[in-house]
Image (cartoon, rainbow, N blue to C red):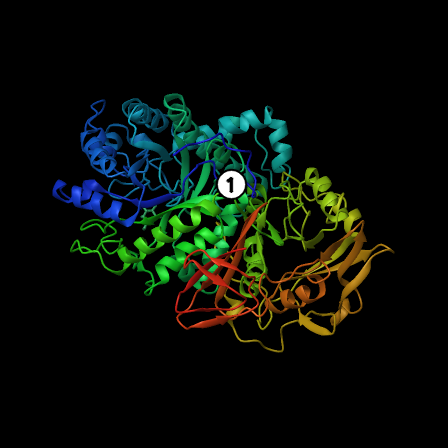
Amino acid sequence: MKRTAPAPLSVWRTLNLDDFLIGVPHYPEHVDESYWERDAERMATAGFNVVRLGEFAWHIMEPREGVFDFSLFDKAIAVLGARGINTIFCTPTATPPRWLTATYPEVLRVDVNDRVATHGSRQHADTNSPVYRMHSRRITEALADHYRDNPHVIGWQTDNELNTTSSTSYSEATEREFRRYLRDRYETIDALNFAWGGNFWATAYDHFDQITAPRAHNPGFPSPGHFQDYHRFLAHATAAFQHDQVEILRRANLDWFIFHNLGRLEDIDFRGQFGQDLDFIGFDIYPMLYDEMRRTGGHAATQALHLDVCRAYSGNFIVPEQASGFGSQPGFSTMTPEPGEMRRMALSSVARGADGLLFFRWRPAHYGAEIYWMGLIDHDDVPRRRYREAVEFAGDVAKIKKDLLGTTVRMDVAIAGADFDNQEAYKTYPMGMPSPFEDAVHLHRYCHAKGIACGFIHPEDDLSRIKLLYVPHWVMWKPQWNANVEAFVKNGGTLVIGAMTGTRDEHNHIPTIPAPGRGLSELCGVRVEEFGRVAEPGADGLFGLHGTEFGLYNAAAQRPASSAARRYKFVLGNREHEAAHLYELLDVDADVKVLGRWSSRFASGRAAITIRKVGEGSAVYMGTYLTETLVENLADQLFARAGIAPLIADLPANVEVTLRHAADRKLLFVLNTDEGTVEISSLPAGMDLLTDKEVNGCLSLGPHGCAVIRF
Ligand code: GAL
């Protein structure tokens, strides 16, 4: 496996490895050694080339402070290596051993209610603590030193899903580090008082030592500036914690690739130092888990959404943990992939940019907090359908990887994403409205269902390959992005700006000019004159269910509609819509065409959605939030003129389609995400690489059937 230096972060970046990583996270420490040879043999037979080891085994590697013992892993790595299975090793810092937290209790995380974490689970240490960082460097140095010349260790994962259990901390160390961060950022207390608006509610400070981490509802709502900086600090501290480890590993061996496996993406600014330090991103994907939690539509749509969000940070990625079967922890359990579905879900990951994939996990644990989290092999050591599907998938990878590596995922419709400040700015002042992400889901789901090439992109990335950019209510739009989006529009792109965009500066202050602010106002030819709150269509109250650290607001949106609710409607094309969440009244320039007008109450007749021709393209302003029906109508109004069409005409329901391409080749992924048989027509003529058969326009796919057509 050869590594080349990574290119700068971009959604269009391909992986910097010359082979596809395929295998499993593996825990040889959970079974006795009599299993090890057989395990390695079965993995080799399956066609695997890698395992991931060690992320929760610090207590084995350093049983007493300063006493290291890597013999268990040395042996496991050698047994696997002899069968051609290489190792990705992990820094084990998600689970410090008990001696460490007993000797240094100050490293324990403290929650918002001042409860100190106890030993007995994971992620109990505070990565902001300088003492914990010192121990993290110590174990990383010992590991790097020990494995620097081991030919079977080819790369590293830092920690495990940083911040997934909790990203916040209120320990003494965190408060101290927070103040240090603020001192570096603002230099003078006056500058901080200005940024946080100290003259409001007498929230000004005399010096940095008086500052504490903000706590929602204790006693009331804190300043949005205070909140924003706390989360900026947490992201900064998470990156610094990882940076320590990366520095040590790079110093030891420059051939090693280094990544992190992201889970919940809390307080991680992947486009900042955190991502710049790594070779590529790893994203753990459990589609059935997310679906139950977030109600975002079917499992396939949820998986596509999460992977597209992840690709926006840095391009192609690996999946270090791909769900294989039933999953549970003591408090919940997930749906179970049906026969064929595990392989299909793995191919869906590849279709959306995975250039490496490990099935979680080789075998399930017999003890601990995940005893029913299944792997490829069952508890009785028998390989059944999940193992067979993994073998099939490894065969698929062997057939496609030569063509696959070096391709990027096509995107015609892109949603602005991957911006830490905007994600956090929403949370500092949510007002019971959907987040940009929740709003964007409507558009993503539509494109996914229709087979339109879609994804997410940061506005400072290369926009020349997309046709439409939707900005979902980014309150903290940065003026430095204007030139890039303006060039995109002038060259023929369609820009759609959602309500509330550009309503705050980087301190969360409201500017003194109307939204969407300097640059965007001129581009769209609109100024927001007035705005007001609207209930969700069909709802009776003013508040939705959208929550953040400030908690959930009342559940009025769930009550049945009554005539008492104020309805704000608008007409777009020949269809009248009920607005969701917000209405804005727009003051428009003479060269702006009004696409949609308010049609009810006092707003009647005022502009709601506008379009302005700029160069070869168009700038659209939308003074409300998306709904399912508005997305359909907007697509009718805008997509054809922007040159956007589905990848395949007449796509049957539940068929997922994406295109991965390079200058000399195109790979069309066609994946049946359901249990019925589907007939697909309008396909390009080409070769299905999975079956080695020619496809001439039509294809029949059985339950969870998959094809990858090269043309
Ligand atoms: C991931 C985590 C794994 C395992 C898995 C299944 O989030 O990284 O260690 O816990 O979920 O629960």
Q: Which residue is mark 1?
A: 14
Q: Secondary structure at mark 1?
A: loop
- In the picture shown, does residue 380 fall above or below 698? above
Q: Nearer the viewer, residue 307 or 570?
A: 307
Residues 174 and 670: in front is: 670
Tell me where residue 26 sits by quadrant: top left
**Residue type at the position of mark 1:** Thr
Q: Is residue 530 left or right of residue 472?
A: right
Q: Nearer the viewer, residue 352 or 314?
A: 352
The picture quadrant where one finds residue 681 is bottom right
Image point (45%, 40%), residue name: 281
Q: Picture coordinates of residue 538 (x, y %)?
A: 58, 73
Q: Is residue 455 above or below residue 270?
A: below
Farthest residue, direction bottom: 563
Give percent across and percent down for residue 496: 69, 55
Q: Position of residue 181 (x, y in %)?
A: 51, 28
Percent position (x, y) of residue 264?
Answer: 43, 47
Residue plotted at (18% across, 55% down): 379
Kindly tell me whether residue 499 is visible in this rendering.
yes
503 sits to left or right of 244: right
* Total count of labels: 1
Residue at 34% x, 50% y: name it. 394
The quadrant of the image that shows the N terminus is top left
Left or right of 373, for residue 346: right
